[in-house]
Image (spheres, rainbow, N blue to C red):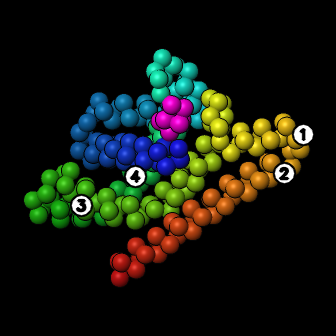
Amino acid sequence: MTLLAAIVGVVCGTFIGIVRVAHDENGNFAVLNALCRVYLTVVRGTPAVIQLLIMYYIVFAGADVGKIWVAAAAFGLNSAAYVAEIARAGILSVDAGQAEAGRSLGLNYAQTMRFIVLPQAFKNVLPAFANEAITLLKETSVCGYIGLMDLTRGGDIIRSVTYDAVLPLAAVALIYLVLVVGLTAGVSKWEKRLKRNER
């Protein structure tokens, strides 16, 4: 679920970030930029749990869609709002001369963004992307609100049966901690490899 949400978040968030940068640079996509700004304001201004409930009880209420897909869509669209700002900051961190060099080689805006700007921007904001992935992983702990079995709900069921809150909740916290530490170590290794490739 976290992986699916991360894919949705990165794809949608990067698209929104590009739209916002393109509008700020040359005024293109005025209507699309306005819609993106409204989207960012609404998503970042409301709790993820409420967005999950709206997605489950309103948006997909009459559709025969699995709960995992609903949760992945909800968390993915929530993550996209934060990824958009990360992507925008990454794009702006790339020297303007890089884009100008791409255009002078005959590349159009989309090609320049794809082959020159975005790869450099990605390396610049990899730690921020990793932080968002960790946040996303922990946010999925509220999926029990739509009846989806996850670690938190499993721990709560065990607690209600055994009347012991310490062991199940400590186990859930430990599992999340191991996942986060593993994800952090993986990203750190990837970041070092990218730095070695630059040399």
In contact (CB < 8 Å): disc 2 and disc 1? no
Locate residue 137 relative to residue 106 in the image: left or right.
right
Percent across and percent down for residue 197 are 36, 78
Q: Amino acid at mark 1?
A: Tyr
Circle 3 sits on which residue? 115
Q: Amino acid at mark 3?
A: Phe
Q: Nearer the viewer, residue 100 or 152?
A: 152
Mark 2 and mark 3: Cα distance apart in space: 50 Å
Q: Report the magenta residues as a range.
A: 66-74
Q: Which mark is residue 87?
A: 4
Q: Amino acid at mark 4?
A: Ala
Q: Estimate how packed mark 2 is, as few (under 14), some (14 to 19) or many (20 or more) residues with alpha carbons within 10 Å.
A: few
Residue positioned 33% across, 35% down in the render = 33
Q: Which mark is residue 140?
A: none
Mark 4 and mark 3: Cα distance apart in space: 15 Å
Mark closest to the chain's N terminus, 2 or 3 = 3
User: Does the magenta-highlighted stretch encompass residue 162?
Assistant: no
Locate residue 175 relative to residue 65 in the image: left or right.
right
Percent across and percent down for residue 12 are 38, 42
Query: Mark 2 or 3, which is nearer the eye?
Result: 2
Q: Nearer the viewer, residue 77 or 37?
A: 77
Percent across and percent down for residue 6 are 47, 48
Mark 2 and mark 1: Cα distance apart in space: 10 Å
Please, which residue is most extreme toward the top here? 62
Residue positioned 40% across, 65% down in the render = 123
Q: Which mark is residue 167?
A: 2
Q: Which mark is residue 163?
A: 1
Residue positioned 32% across, 47% down in the render = 18
